Image (tube, rainbow, N blue to C red):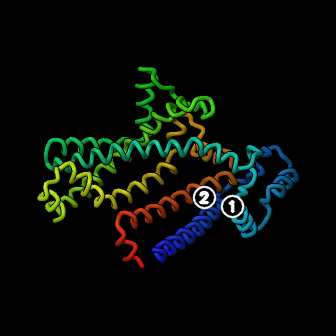
Amino acid sequence: MSIFLLKRALILLATLAGASLVIFGMLEILPGDAALLQMGPDASPQAVQALAAQLGLDRPPLERYLHWIAGLLQGDLGLSYAYSTPVSELVWERLAVTVPLAIMAMLLSAVLALAAGVYAAARHHRLGDIGVMALSQLGMALPNFWFAILLILFFSVHLQWFSAGGFPGWGESPWEALKSLLLPAVSLAVVQAAILARVTRSAVLEVLREDFVRTARAKGLSRRATLWGHVLRNALIPVVTVMGLQFANLLAGTIVVENVFYLPGLGRLIFQSIANRDLIVVRNCVMLLAAMVVLINFIVDLLYAVIDPRIASRDI
């Protein structure tokens, strides 16, 4: 098990190093001058050069890359060009919205998908199975932003149960903060739940054909107890894989939904920073999202070993 963990940790570090090189290189080749954008088109060349030197933009790319990595390792993300605020403060403030939103969406998606997938598998080729598959196909076809607009029109404009956008903050009223994230979470969860339900159904159907299921039924276990107590656990590996990828996508894919609901999350910060050419914020935010994706995949690998210890022994 220790060798399994060591190999996965080395892969994680190598992936993060490669991601940092790609992110830094891609932002370096983008056209435009951050110093000129901040000073304005009427600024003198001397003033632009002075600001570029102050921001460190006149240094060689390799030196700036190493300085950036050293700052990351020390927890120093630098100072935002546009906001004149430490990037770490901006990021942590926005993560307080994005992470709870992604967690809520993932929980909703998992509950809906597991229930629908097991239900469909238990009624294979019957009306319930056909209905779940039809709904999941419809859910996969819905764009998140379009479904978000429909939710606003129905629940905010027509019924007036929820606000159409904005975030009151966790300090004022945690309940109101959770309520403001509910519609965005639902709009994100629908597509993910549709995909995960189909994966769950396929995995459960495959396990249902195994000999141990027939043995459990022969020993007198009810169909419900067999499904939830034995079949689902053995079907979890492909389900957990997709859930890990989906959670990573939810963290990295909230930009559109956060803009629809006007939420001050990480996605909206990235969108605003791109418009302001605040590359230091964009670089650190994208690197943070990449690190989250890699870390979630690492956690999924660990869950594999917990669900089925044979995976760790085979990987040594």
Residue 207 percent coordinates (x, y): 22, 60
Residues at marks 1 and 2 touching, judged by CB atoms closer than 8 Å: yes
Q: Which residue occupies 47% across, 61% down? A: 299
Is residue 269 rendered to the left or right of residue 1? right
Is residue 67 rendered to the left or right of residue 145? right
Is residue 195 rendered to the left or right of residue 298? left
Q: Which residue occupies 56% across, 72% down? A: 14
- Among all residues in the image, which is located at the extreme left? 218
On-image quarter of the C terminus: bottom left
Amino acid type indicated by mark 2? Met
Residue 301 percent coordinates (x, y): 43, 65
Residue 265 percent coordinates (x, y): 58, 42
Q: Which residue occupies 68% across, 49% down? A: 277
Which residue in the protein does label 2 denote? 287
Q: Tell me where residue 185 sits by quadrant.
A: top left
Above or below residue 100? Residue 17 is below
Q: How many marks?
A: 2
Which residue in the protein does label 1 denote? 72
Query: Is disc 1 placed on a helix, strand or loop?
Result: helix
Q: Which of 50 and 100 lies nearest the eye of the viewer?
A: 100
